[in-house]
Amino acid sequence: FFFQILVDMKVSFIIFSLLFVFALCSEEGGIPVSPLPRFTCNPYEVEPDEPAPTNVNQLAPHNIDVIMSMGDSMTAAFAATAGKLLSTPLIPREDRYLSYTAGGGSMQYTVNNFLKLYNKNILGYSSGQTLPIDGLEIFGHHIDPQLKEIVGLNAGISGAKVQDIPQEIDYLVSQLQTTYADTIDFENSWKMATILIGANNLCVACHNNTADSPETYGQLLNSSIAQLEASIPRVRVNILPMFNITQVYYWSRTNTYCTRIWDLFEECPCLTKDSTEQDLQTVNDYAVEYRKQIDNIAAYWQSKNSSTFTVSVQPITESLKIINGALTSDFDCFHPSELAHAWLGSVIWNSIWLPADQKPTNATELMINGLEFVCPDRHTYMQ
């Protein structure tokens, strides 16, 4: 839907002119974000004839051959580097090359780039930008991400809801069997997949439709994970819980430009100037229930004790707080900025090597107090 909004903007010169008046520049406010430290982990020696592991719970960094992502415009990194309205380019890009997990851009703090230190042949990362035309729907079906060699295995679709994850899985299967047919061993390579989904369901939670209820969210996400297990061999899945997105709305009201942009776009229907406190509370309540569903889903798949497939929650976004305007896009004051993607990638990296009781649940605390990278060794396994 982002692309449709932007096309409408391009057609309407009047709206452009009015927004030019309102596009006021102001200093980013809030609690200062600590600088990310240099990633100084060193690779370890691996014997060239070392056999691949046979258990999904014994995957060291060098064992991950393929990185995959699913989600919405946050995973597609929409507008992460975009400037304010009327900046060039007029239509913001999906900056997939810096997306927190699968971004493969040079010097970007992403899980892929950290893993690449241990396995230089890892595949699936995104290498560039795409236009958000995947936000368009035809007969209720999103257009698949284009420029497939750039997109790689980041199947994130702008505007996606949990109902769209099956389409993203189909896209991954197609990519693995076509674009990567000669470079990825479909049956035997170990794959890591990350899912962050639900923001667009939360954005209409106040409408109280069954399609966006926590129960439906849980059922659809669980059935999608079952589809993933049946479709792609040897996968370790990370799920990121949805944070309370109402705080992004509240933050926008502290900045004149952001307030004007939110009022114009109304890209989150339950978070507008006309929304009631009950509307916002419903969004928050649903976010809490979505997180409970995610925990239950992970527990279910872990109880199956499969040697080739499992699901873990990386709870870093559970209590995430927006503490500084620099963490949101300059364009729409909604989507994560390049800085936010770097922090998410860094905290996810630490989380995947820590046992459940040591995993950080609030990336914000690390942003304030600083982060020290976890440097796994040959016998550190993903958790």
Image (spheres, grey):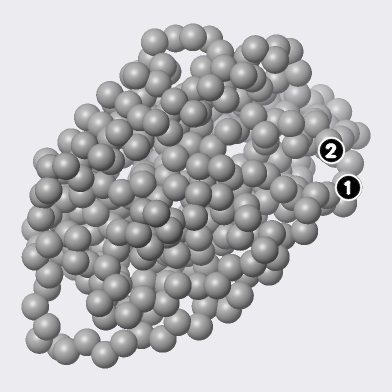
Give the residue displayed 41% in from the left and 86% down from the top: 42
Corner quadrant of residue 24:
top right
Look at the image and tell me in which quarter the C terminus lies.
bottom left
For badge 1, the amino acid type reads Ser
Q: Position of residue 47 (x, y in %)?
A: 16, 89
For badge 2, the amino acid type reads Asn
Corner quadrant of residue 115:
bottom left
Give the residue displayed 45% in from the left and 72% down from the top: 374
Q: Is residue 152 visible?
A: no
Give the label on residue 255, or none.
2
Q: Which residue is denoted by mark 1 in the rendering?
A: 26
Sequence order check, earlier mark of 2 and 1: 1
The one of 38 and 329 positioned closer to us in this rendering: 38
Q: Position of residue 232 (x, y in %)?
A: 15, 48
The one of 337 and 235 positioned closer to us in this rendering: 235
Q: Are marks 2 and 1 in contact (CB under 8 Å)?
A: yes
Q: Mark 2, residues whose alpha carbon is within 10 Å: few (<14), some, or many (≥20)? A: some
